[in-house]
Image (spheres, grey):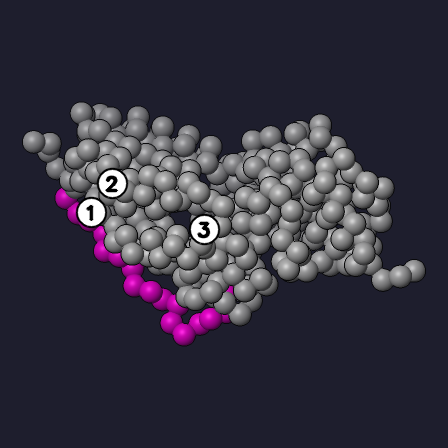
């Protein structure tokens, strides 16, 4: 039988590895109801992976036989440099958080090895079959807001998460934080595309983050007039009173990269070579060259921004979706 681990040792190691906050929860199966209802309602859109490996998402013992503890880990992505306007969502302006969190998980493993010899683990960021926000809430990191985001008091919702399962118990577990949204509905009112269909429930089919990142075909026409960014959407977070004005953790790994300083017109006219150069090592690469330019054109059109005339010749782009987006955007300009 494995010896019980010290929670303080684990949490100290997590902080030393670079995580800004960490918490511990018992590795107990998650209630399947919320996920099943979300999937059954089609709210996952084309994200088919959310309906795959469902039992592993719900039962940590399927990912790590004998799992006893879940270590929820998180980092705040905000730096003072994020105050500059950008067509890129705040979390994606720096280095891809998946790489940063995985680097820190590797450091954490090395730090824990002498403290917990023989203890097995399974760790993943949000690309694996883990419900990281549920575990973060269970481990006391924060509470789930009405916009579906984890809100960490003192940091707000501009956080990224990872999960580590351990096959040993610890001497102290954290309690879940209660809901603190109260009667506030600022995010529901502010969502430009009405994607938050009820408190805590987001319809991906209407979400601009989904549309600009996961949808690689045509940009849904009913959503076009609401687009504001070329990658992601921050609206529901910017209006949230739990996001402290001017808050910054100033973690160098999340410092905005040059791509965040581009204008929408710059992004709409990117060459393939320049796209690769600017987005290498960032989450923005997920949109692909065609997708980022399509998104930029849509945002230009939504704003009726005359800057689009700088790149108007690209309305004859070889990519069908970029071409359609550019022509729609140009049609939104008032006649000369």
Query: Bounds of the magenta span?
Result: 171-187
Q: 303 and 109: which one is in front? A: 303
Would residue 166 be found to the left or right of residue 4 on screen?
A: right
SS for dot 2: helix
Q: 19 and 336: which one is in front? A: 336
Q: Which of marks 2 and 1 is nearer the N terminus?
A: 1
Q: The C terminus lies in which quarter of the figure?
A: bottom right
Number of dots carrying numbers: 3
For the stretch drawn in magenta, the main secondary structure is loop
Pointer 3 local density, CA inside 10 Å: few below 14, some 14–19, many at least 20: some
Residue drawn at (69%, 53%), measured in percent from left and top? Answer: 299
Q: Look at the picture and state if 138 lies above or below 67.
A: below
Alpha-carbon span between mark 3 and mark 2? 22 Å
Circle number at residue 60:
2
Circle number at residue 44:
3
Residue 183 magenta: yes
Q: Could you tell me residue 56's position as x and y percent?
A: 28, 40
1 or 3: mark nearer the eye: 3
Residue bearing the label numbered 1: 28
| Discs 2, 1 touching: Cβ within 8 Å | yes
Circle number at residue 176:
none
Q: Earlier in the sequence, mark 1 or mark 3?
A: 1
Q: Could you tell me residue 237's position as x and y percent?
A: 51, 59
Residue drawn at (21%, 38%), measured in percent from left and top? Answer: 61
Q: Could you tell me residue 212's position as x and y percent?
A: 60, 47
Q: Earlier in the sequence, mark 3 or mark 2?
A: 3
Would residue 257 be found to the left or right of residue 58 on screen?
A: right
Pointer 2 local density, CA inside 10 Å: few below 14, some 14–19, many at least 20: many
């Amino acid at each position: 039988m494995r010896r019980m681990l010290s929670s303080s040792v684990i949490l100290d190691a997590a902080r030393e590895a670079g995580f800004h906050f960490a918490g511990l929860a018992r590795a107990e199966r998650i209630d399947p109801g919320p996920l099943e209802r979300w999937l059954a309602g089609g709210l996952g859109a084309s994200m088919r992976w959310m309906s795959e490996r469902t039992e592993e998402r719900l039962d940590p013992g399927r990912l790590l036989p004998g799992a006893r503890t879940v270590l929820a880990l998180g980092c705040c992505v905000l730096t003072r440099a994020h105050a500059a306007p950008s067509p890129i969502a705040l979390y994606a302006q720096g280095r891809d958080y998946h790489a940063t969190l995985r680097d820190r998980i590797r450091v954490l493993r090395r730090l824990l090895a002498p403290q917990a010899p023989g203890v097995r683990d399974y760790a993943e960021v949000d690309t694996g079959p883990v419900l990281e926000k549920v575990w973060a809430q269970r481990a006391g990191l924060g509470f789930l807001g009405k916009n579906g985001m984890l809100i960490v008091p003192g940091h707000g919702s501009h956080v990224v998460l990872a999960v580590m399962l351990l096959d040993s118990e610890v001497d102290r577990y954290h309690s879940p934080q209660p809901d603190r949204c109260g009667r506030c509905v600022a995010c529901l009112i502010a969502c430009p595309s009405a994607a938050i269909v009820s408190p805590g429930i987001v319809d991906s089919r209407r979400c601009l983050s989904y549309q600009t990142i996961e949808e690689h075909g045509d940009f849904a026409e009913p959503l076009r007039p609401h687009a504001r960014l070329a990658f992601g959407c921050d609206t529901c977070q910017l209006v949230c009173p739990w996001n402290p004005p001017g808050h910054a953790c100033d973690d160098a790994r999340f410092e905005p990269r040059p791509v965040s300083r581009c204008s929408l017109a710059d992004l709409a006219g990117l060459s393939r070579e320049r796209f690769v150069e600017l987005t290498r090592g960032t989450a923005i690469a997920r949109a692909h060259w065609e997708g980022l330019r399509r998104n930029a054109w849509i945002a230009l059109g939504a704003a009726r921004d005359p800057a689009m005339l700088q790149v108007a010749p690209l309305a004859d782009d070889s990519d069908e979706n970029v071409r359609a987006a550019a022509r729609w955007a140009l049609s939104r300009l008032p006649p000369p």
